[in-house]
Image (cartoon, helix red, strand yellow):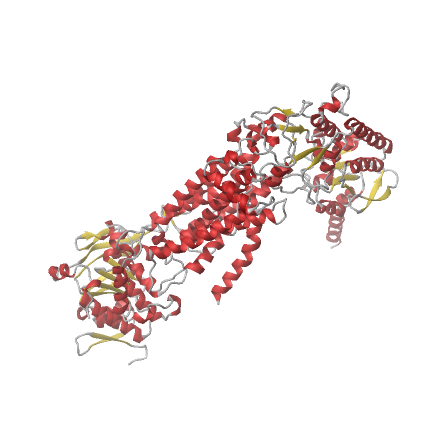
Amino acid sequence: MRPLTLRRLLLQCLLLTVILFLVVVGALKFGAVPVSLYALARDLLRVILGQSSQISSDYGLIIENIRLPRIILGIIVGASLSVAGTSFQALLRNPLADPYVLGVSSGAALGAILGLIAEPHLALPPAFAALLTPLCAFLGATATIAAVYFLGRREGQIDSTTLLLGGVITASFLSALIMFLMTIVTSSNTRGMAFWLMGNLSTSFQKSVYWFLAAGFAVASGIIYTTANDLNLLLAGEKEAMHLGVDVRRVQLVVYIAASFLTGLAVSVSGAVGYVGLIVPHIMRFIFGSDHRTLLPTAALGGAIAVVIADTVARTVVAPNEIAVGAVTAIVGAPLFIYLLRRRLT
Amino acid sequence: MSLRLRSVASTAVVAFFCAAAPLCAQSAPPDSGAAPAFREVVDETGRAVRIPQPVKRIVSLAPSMTETVYALGVQDRLVGDTDFCDYPPDAQTKTKVGGGINPSLEKIASLHPDLVLVTKAFNLPETVHSLEGLGISSYATDPHTVNDIITSTKRVADLLGVPDAGTTVGDDMQRRLNQLQHQLGALPPRQVLFVVWTQPLISVGRSTFIADALLHAGAVSIVDSSQDWPHVSLEEVARLQPEYLVFADSHSETVSAQVDTLATLPAWRILNAVANRRFAVISDAVNRPAPRIVSAIEDLARQLHPEAFADKPSDAKDKEKQTSPGPAKSSRNFAHDMPSQPLETHALAGGCTCAL
Amino acid sequence: MSSPALARNPSEASRLGNEPRLGVEQVSYAYSANPAQAPLFTLEATSFQARPGEIVAVLGPNASGKSTLLQIIAGALPPLSGRVLLNGFVVHSLSPRTRAQRIAMVQQESRLLFPARAWEFVLQGRHAHGRSLRFESSDDVLIAKNALTQVGAAELSDRWMDQISGGEKQRVILARALSQQPLLLLLDEPTLHLDIAAQVGLLDALRRLAAENRYTVVIVTHELNLAAEYADQVVLMQRGRCLRVGPPASIYQRELLEQVFQTPLSVEFSSNGRPRVTVLSGNQP
């Protein structure tokens, strides 16, 4: 009998953090533009010390303004999707659940497309114009969260089966709408949207956006973490969890909103990066067990690692061109999932 | 009994004719007088096509083909085009058959065309096969360079029975391009990034006619990709530091606002072209492999190399072949060159830090 | 061997002596599948009381409202009328957490989405005690260990839940309920999937635990003989109505049982005073 202790949890997180750090260093080094580790260290130090203006190396600007923000985005998106995926798998008591199963990503995509169509007709100040797509996507996500919540209720409260059904139906309805809009939109718009839909981290944002994303992630995943023990019990069934003292309705509502918010956050800035929210929780469960007090933080770190690696591959494998990071996660994710499935069955 | 047999027989005969009539109507054009003649050609995708002669009714499934038809002066034979065919304005009055990728086959068939014009880039092979199944011939063009466009135009003119118009249009295009070449002289081409989409950054590949058009305009695309619409890494663009960004948009104010927006983003700000607002806007004619592309090329050349045209007033050349006014296009003859912040003085490889 | 850690406030329990701990007062329940239809009464006004250390069997054929009654006693369903009192508190108005500290439910099968070890499973019973987000203390671990020992499943501690037999699983589920340190222990058809040895083992353990730790135990069952053998009190139900409440001797009357269970029976009394029921087939003379 070895119950979970804080010390063991911290050790596991530390291990993954070290791995993440190494992955980030690798991601900073590799890319369309080659960088030496020495120059990298020197410039990073300057960034940390606030002496960015002294960066004069050939590639320092590229690192600071393109590669580093992109890596940070990858970390936030990967962590958000993994935490959301873990939460939905517990909430819906379904190991095949991923962050997109309840339609949030379709809602975000629809919002983004509508924003795209509306943009030429709106006179927006420059700083705000850059935020239009992610904002519209986030609004679309929020609207979908609310709609699926109301659809997913039974007798006034969330019921996991009804929620799943409501979400799946909403997702497919929204996807149909998106397909329709794509056919009536002009061809260059279609190309841009297609890349966005596949999931890509190449979008550049103002600094404040990254802070907002980080804060949003911290708050939402913190809230989910407070229910970690409740989620452990929920896995046995709603009735049993209630008999063991879990306020099932409250936990379901809180986790649903927080996990959907995380998904909306991620999708608004990166499109729908697939397989991360589905597979990373399973891998972490395989290694560390299904206790959510460990699973949630390790899934977050694991997701960050996975997305940063995938994005590094996406932008180096056909350099100087790029492929969408969603393509990389799909190519790696699908076979990996099949492998995990078979291991569990034997 | 015989009465019943008769009624059955007459019903059968009537039914047969009701079924046969539309089939007959489809296969015979409404005003078929003499026995139809055919011409066997190979289109630009390598397909063997049988084209009825003469071609009296044309449907165009691509905006570039519509413009070509007008340029050749045979627009009264154009009986249908797509929703996206907007130039010249008269093209908008033609019967619409839907989009380029998903046109209504029924509508096309109901127009009884002799020939349907398509392009490999804008249309799908499935559409062509379906039309074949209906007994309608299609001819596809697939130009990859500006010279290809000239050749295609002449070939299409020949098919439509107006080879002289084809020669005139094609030769005029060639003449204007040669003139442009002469004016540009030995000026080094500008390193440019042709922007199809900003986020994610999509540009054009080296095998596209757009990339070739850039060459004719005294520019060279910094993107060298075998894909037609490559998703380009911003890092690479930041390393190469193109002198100009080129946008194809009918509204230059939109582009100006777009560049202002880009200037607020860290990844774009470090591009000199963005920081110094060095961009050129040309009409979206550059996206269409049709005679009007030459106007766009000339416009771009003027914006990128104003000094080559300094001694020639802008109205000396009639850039527009069409008499009817085209859609709103950039009225500026020079590149936008208003630095909104002090010039960066980074010594980045391949970058130009001086103002023009 | 009694384990004081498994009983809540044992001194309080003995001080209260034999006051009724559980009071079910005129509890009824109805639900309507269709708003236009009249509601269907699954449970009509039912009352009984139970003391610490007592085992109550809620007995009846299928669809007699037994499980509904149990859910209402557990506080999971609000009664349409009446109330359930536990040491004076109205059960349904307590928070789920407080309820779980006093009432433990043992249901038949536990479907776990992801596999867990037996000790993890039993530790879940400690969730209601303490903050929601916390790491289990050494006390918690001790209580869980004791619970497994009490049900005779200590050697199953490290086994995976999906790799043990039905009877073993039932004991682990009971251990989890015990680790909640409840006052009231509720079991819904606990013997359903067990072989006869496991059934007897379970009920023997329940009787012993109820006596040692002063639990009040309510078992829902349709097993006539098990109820007769182990219950101190029987609540006889048929089609949502409570027909009679009392010790087995007063309930196990042949005509009454035949009417409820719709089958010919014979009732005898064994040497220990407990009734025993034999089912008669149609061909008996």
Residue B60 horizontal side relative to residue C117, left or right: right
x then y, percent, for residue B143: 76, 40
User: Residue at 52% across / 39% down in the picture?
Assistant: A64
Residue B139 appears in which quarter of the rendering? top right
Instruction: Name the foreground residue: A327 vs A107.
Output: A327
Residue A35 horizontal side relative to residue B81, left or right: left
Query: Up-down: is B153 above or below A244?
Result: above
x then y, percent, for residue B279: 64, 29
Task: Give the quarter of the figure containing the C terminus of chain B.
Answer: top right
x then y, percent, for residue C68: 29, 58
Q: Residue furthest bottom?
A: C285
Instruction: Name the foreground residue: A101 vs B292.
Output: B292
Can residue A331 be seen by looking at this rendering? yes
Q: How many marks?
A: 0
Instruction: Name the foreground residue: A319 vs A288.
Output: A319
Residue A258 appears in which quarter of the rendering? top left
Query: Up-down: is A15 above or below A178?
Result: below
Residue B212 horizontal side relative to residue A319, left or right: right
Can residue C238 be seen by looking at this rendering? no
x then y, percent, for residue C168: 33, 70
Instruction: Name the foreground residue: B319 vs A167.
Output: B319
Task: Give the quarter of the figure containing the N terminus of chain B.
Answer: bottom right
